[in-house]
Image (spheres, helix red, strand yellow):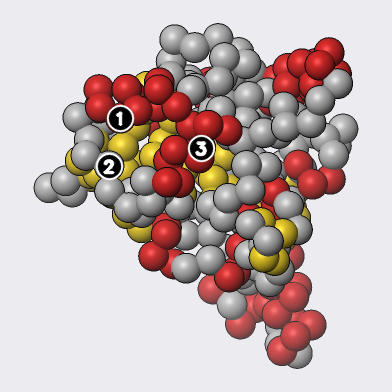
Amino acid sequence: MTKIVDLSHLIVSDPPELPDFLRSEVSYNDHAQGAGEFEQLLGIDRSLLLREEGPAAERLSIGTHSVTHLDAPYHYNSTIQGRPSETIDELPLEWFFAPGVVVDALEREDGDAVTREQMQAGIEAAGHELEPLDIVLVQTGTDRLYGRPGYMHHGPGVSAEATRWLWEQGVRVMGIDAWGWDAPLRIQAEVARERNAPGILWAAHQVDLPYSQIERLTNLAALPKTGFKVACFPLKISRASAAPARVVAIVD
């Protein structure tokens, strides 16, 4: 038997106070409105439709970073390793369907980013033999706060060193069930201001590596630590820095 586990959050309309690039809006047309549209489009009377109902339809306005989504290298910097960064539509599809492993970071505090050594230990504890193009998912439990005020300020995140180590092992897609792959930006910004130094704020994003990260996953607790595949194909949006995706795990 094969089980499919949904790792994506539901898309709903967000509060208007959220910045545009983070907000989703869904508007709904019911069957009566659909009948009116058919009358205008086809020049017919709605009495010709079953129960005088036309097509229900929705309109979606969504930021590419507003829900469960994948970041492209272009999101991090305009150039990476001296070359123009790839946008989401330029990344190979082979990246987005591969064996997965869950790394346990449930006991970590907000801002306590997973180090290289802890990432290695987490993969070993999962009983997973890491291979190139495997997809690494970090479970923090922060998805329980999704949709609540302050959600973006919680979670441990992953360090730049751990990110670089994963990339050196051939991993090109890595994900987390928190607002972002880095430790919360507010915490990183405080340290950056105190030290007055670059390379602290957004460090794992700007590690100068061409990789893709899945942000705002959910339901990782429903997965085994290893022995499943991840399908996380992003929408094919021209020249975009990210794209929403319906991320699922396929468990045998």
Pointer 1 with pointer 2, Cβ within 8 A: yes
- Residue of label 3: 163
Mark nearer the N terminus (3 vs 1): 1
Q: Residue at x 85, y 39 (%)?
A: 19
What kind of residue is marked 2?
Answer: Leu
Q: Seen in the image, is 193 located left or right of residue 218?
A: right
Seen from the viewer's position, the closer of residues 157 and 244 is 157
Q: Badge 3 local density, few (<14 within 10 Å), some, or many (20+)? A: many
What kind of residue is marked 1?
Answer: Ile
Q: Position of residue 87 (x, y in %)?
A: 65, 64
Seen from the viewer's position, the closer of residues 29 and 81 is 81
Secondary structure under badge 2? Answer: loop
- Residue of label 1: 123
- Residue of label 2: 130
Q: Badge 1 local density, few (<14 within 10 Å), some, or many (20+)? A: many
Q: Residue at x 43, y 15 (%)?
A: 106
As drawn, 47 above or below 129: below
